[in-house]
């Protein structure tokens, strides 16, 4: 189980090992990407779905306007993306459509290449969407116009790359929800019932204290999933906001919730750290979060420093705040 599954790396690893798993995340973007890693359509099924959507009659009814959109995407590329957006918002239930949605989210923006295009956008970082004002200034300064890429060919290439091999058909659940909310317990219990055994291993990494930019940093992908066509700044429902005391309490609720479907002796491995803009005593905060949760630390080791964001930020010639040193905590259910 991963109560902060993000893009589903833990769940994909479990699937490759033939282990049933459950992933939970509060971000619709993370859930959509994680879901794409839980399905197994053939590349041909994904490609056929994409072709049928683009060849369907009618034009998209909601195409964003403005200088940012004119410079971010070629007009024909944006039209096709909007057509995909409306079709997938209307129906994204089949494995092929879930996979297609994940492929488009992954290719929505990224660096331009000299050879075969891999992304739909003008020059941009891959892991986060820069804000419109800075993007427009950057593109104008460097004379960068949006390329007219072959949208279907990018989808074909990615479909064959990601779905061309067969993975074990084990049960993988990906749930949109707040792991600190008591209402999530019934989902955990349903999963335990479906696999017929208590959860024996939890592997996760919660949002570090002070992290609050995920929604804004992912605003383009959020738009594709039905969000507004402009940056949305909001911090509600984000575990890492508020005081350190509130953060510790919400983490504690997560550990208690997952513990309700774990038997005695189950293991939990948590990678935990802090960010430079909101430094905390990593060991003390994590230790406090385990108080009266039924989990105890039996081992810890340094995981080094996090390189998160450094490589991708280079695409726009600036650096992002790095995380401080991280620690892997190994816990046992008592």
Image: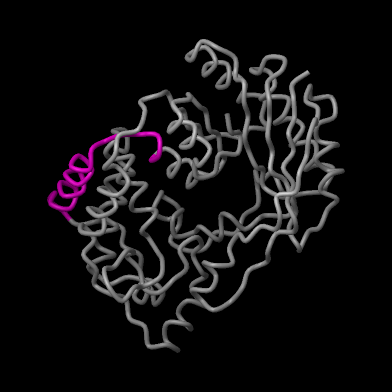
Residue at the image point whose x is 62% and y is 54% from the top: 234
Looking at the image, residue 147 lies above or below residue 103? below
Q: Is residue 301 left or right of residue 214?
A: right
Compare residues 260 and 140 and report the one nearer the observer. Answer: 260
Residue 129 at what x, y percent from top left?
Answer: 49, 64
Compare residues 40 and 75 and report the one nearer the observer. Answer: 40
Q: Is residue 89 left or right of residue 188?
A: left
Residue at the image point whose x is 37% and y is 60% from the top: 108
Looking at the image, residue 316 lies above or below residue 292? below
Say which quarter of the image contains residue 106. Answer: bottom left
In the rendered image, residue 263 lying in the magenta stretch gets the answer: no
Magenta highlight range: 36-58
Residue at the image point whose x is 70% and y is 50% from the top: 303
Looking at the image, residue 48 lies above or below residue 82? above
State the predominant SS element of the stretch in magenta: helix
Say which quarter of the image contains residue 150. Answer: bottom left
Q: Is residue 144 left or right of residue 9?
A: left
Residue 280 at what x, y percent from top left?
Answer: 83, 53
Compare residues 39 and 63 and report the one nearer the observer. Answer: 39
Residue 323 at what x, y percent from top left?
Answer: 70, 59
Say which quarter of the image contains residue 276. Answer: bottom right
Residue at the image point whose x is 81% and y is 48% from the top: 282
Residue 296 at what x, y percent from top left?
Answer: 81, 27
Q: Is residue 87 left or right of residue 127?
A: left
Q: Quadrant of the C terminus?
A: top right
């Amino acid at each position: 189980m991963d109560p902060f599954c993000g893009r589903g790396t833990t769940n994909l690893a479990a699937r490759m090992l033939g282990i049933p798993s459950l992933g939970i995340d509060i971000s619709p973007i993370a859930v959509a990407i994680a879901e794409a890693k839980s399905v197994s359509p053939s590349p041909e099924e994904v490609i056929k779905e994409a072709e049928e959507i683009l060849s369907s009659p009618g034009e998209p009814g909601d195409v964003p306007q403005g200088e940012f959109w004119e410079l971010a995407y070629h007009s024909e590329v944006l039209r096709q993306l909007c057509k995909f957006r409306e079709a997938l918002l209307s129906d994204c239930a089949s494995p092929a459509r879930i996979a297609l949605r994940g492929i488009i989210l992954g290719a929505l923006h990224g660096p331009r290449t000299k050879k075969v295009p891999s992304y739909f956008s003008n020059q941009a970082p891959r892991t986060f969407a820069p804000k419109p004002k800075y993007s427009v200034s950057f593109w104008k300064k460097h004379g960068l116009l949006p390329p007219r890429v072959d949208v279907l060919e990018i989808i074909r290439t990615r479909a064959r790359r990601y779905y061309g091999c067969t993975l074990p058909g084990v049960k993988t659940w990906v749930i949109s929800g707040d792991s600190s909310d008591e209402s999530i317990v019934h989902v955990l219990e349903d999963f335990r019932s479906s696999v017929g055994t208590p959860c024996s291993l939890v592997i996760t990494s919660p949002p570090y204290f002070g992290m609050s930019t995920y929604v804004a940093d992912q605003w383009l992908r959020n738009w594709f999933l039905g969000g507004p066509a402009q940056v949305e700044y909001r911090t509600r429902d984000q575990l890492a906001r508020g005081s350190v005391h509130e953060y510790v309490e919400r983490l504690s609720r997560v550990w208690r919730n997952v513990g309700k479907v774990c038997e005695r002796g189950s293991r939990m491995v948590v990678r935990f750290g802090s960010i430079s803009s909101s430094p905390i005593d990593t060991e003390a905060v994590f230790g406090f979060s385990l108080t009266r949760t039924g989990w105890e630390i039996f081992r810890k080791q340094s995981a080094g420093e996090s390189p998160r964001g450094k490589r991708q930020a280079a695409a726009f010639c600036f650096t992002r705040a790095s995380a401080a040193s991280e620690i892997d905590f190994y816990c046992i259910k008592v």
